[in-house]
Image: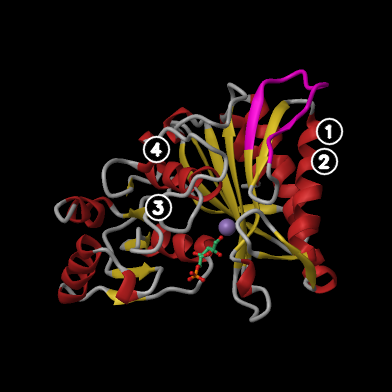
Amino acid sequence: MFLKEHLLGVPEDVKTLILLVSEQAKKIRKGFLEHSRLAGTKNIYGEEQLELDKWADDIILKAMEESKLVRSVASEERDEITSIVKARGSWGITVDPLDGMSCVETNLSVGTIIGMFNEGNVLEPGNKMDAACFVLYGPLTTLTYAYKGWGCHEFVLDEQGNFVLRNESMKIPEGKIYGSGALRKDWIPQHKKYIEELEKQGYKLRFSGSFTADFNQVLHYGGLFTYPASTGSPSGKLRLLFEGNPMAFIAKEAGGNSFNGKKSILDVKPEILSQRVPIYIGDKKTIDLAKKFF
Ligand code: F6P
Ligand code: MN
């Protein structure tokens, strides 16, 4: 089954927006060779931008503008929300155009992450989100989407340019892999003890440096992805709006869970666009165990 057929089950706007993302993903996939030089600029987090980053950001923004469905777009690569005055629709979209960009040079998998709010306001907790999706550019190009109450589904790009169903109604299994960001010496004590317990239980370390790829692994095999609070960075590294929320939403639709050390990531009310959040996402059992340590 093709993505466009599968999307007949969700509201028309969601279908249109996810199909638009899938079309931009095909362009981004083709652009890696030409656009993977350094742009010579940094984003608001001080991270070096690739030409590809800005280029991917531009094409996604343009597609959202042209859809006429989107009133506001917040991107990890922009300091401010872009308001689209001519929009007929009321959607608010969050975009991480190229997640895991340090992995481009070494040819590891990277991704595009999108969150969708039909009320237009992106500065809302993730539990107000209606849909989310991510594209993973790996040996295969996959698009995984989740719509509120409709579950999480994965599609793979074929040679004819169609996204074909690969996994329907995904459920995160109980698994024994984990990936943790930040330096071990800087981990907060609760995190340290939790990871020690996982290792004692036989959880195996797998961390690539690309959140989309690492999260996708957990979606398929279970276990845990975490980028914790650390001594130098009490909110961790990853961004609530662009990274934490869409993936926490997708995990929830796949029967998994998320946690920030206090509550579900989806219950955190963002105050600023660039807000960071400690991240624990994984299968339900592994996240329940995390809660015992905080
Ligand atoms: O977007 C930030 C990001 O590239 C994530 O994709 C990834 O999980 C993280 O940074 C890796 O950070 P570090 O280089 O500190 O391991
Ligand atoms: Mn990112």
**Helix, strand, or loop for circle 1?**
helix
Compared with 17, 215 (above or below) is below
Residue marked by disc 4: 266
Real-space Cα distance between discs 2 and 3?
32 Å
Could you tell me which residue is drawn at 45 percent across and 35 percent down? Answer: 126
Nearest the eye: 94 or 6: 94
Residue 222 in which image quadrant: bottom left
Mark 2, Cα crowd under 10 Å, few <14 / some 14-19 / many 20+, is few
Amino acid at the residue labelled 2: Lys
Residue marked by disc 3: 235
Percent position (x, y) of residue 196? 19, 72
Residue 84 in which image quadrant: top right
Could you tell me which residue is drawn at 85 percent across and 71 percent down? Answer: 34
Amino acid at the residue labelled 4: Leu
Residue 114 falls left or right of residue 77: left
Compared with 116, 190 (above or below) is below
Nearest the eye: 170 or 73: 73
Real-space Cα distance between discs 3 and 4?
15 Å
Q: What stretch is highlighted in magenta?
A: 80-93
Residue marked by disc 2: 62
